[in-house]
Image (tube, rainbow, N blue to C red):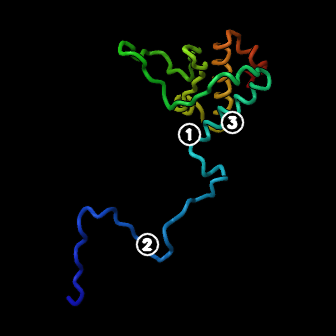
Amino acid sequence: MDNPVTPRAAGTGPRRRDRHGRGMRGPIAPPQVPLAMSRAEAFADLVQDSVERLERRWPQLADIDFLVLDVPHLDGPGQVWDDEAVPLGGTISARDGRRARVVVYRRPVEIRTKGREERAALVHEVVVEQVAELLGLTPETVDPRYGED
């Protein structure tokens, strides 16, 4: 053994290799390309597109916050899941100086859709239904094309 290899000290960090001298790998696509967006970012864009579409007809939507959460959660200690469907969205009324909120749950919507077009249509339906509930109107009043496939 001419060149003994000394063992690596434990706990010095992860072992990184640059096998062929090319350097560390970079991102697969530049940030401005849709491929670089995460699923959560793409979903948030669908919600934003739907809101912008409705704001042309209903300018008061600028006073409402639109949120995307991954999954619905239980608010109180006594609440339990029942056998009914998982909600796709919800509303929180304005109170104590807070603005009203519309929440869209990303994972339940994604599970129920197969492609981007189908997902965009379902997101728009959920946003329309929640805005209608918050404004005390019917979904058809909020968006005359509601329910059209």
**Residues at marks 1 and 2, CA–CA distance in whole angstroms:** 32 Å
Q: Amino acid at mark 1?
A: Ala
Residue 14 pos. (x, y %): 34, 62
Q: Residue at x 64, y 27 (%)?
A: 122
Which amino acid is tagged 2?
Asp
Mark 3 and mark 2 lie on one chain; the one further toward the N terminus is 2
Instruction: Tell me the quarter of the picture where residue 10 sits.
Output: bottom left
Direction from residue 25 to residue 74 in the image, left or right = left
Circle 3 residue: 117
Circle 2 SS class: loop
Which mark, residue 40?
1
Residue under the image location 63 percent in, 33 percent down: 119
Tag on residue 18?
A: 2
Instruction: Please tell me whether mark 3 sits on a helix, a strand or a loop.
Output: helix
Question: Distance from label 1 to label 3 (Cα)?
Answer: 16 Å
Q: Residues within 10 Å of mark 3 (few under 14, many from 20)?
A: few
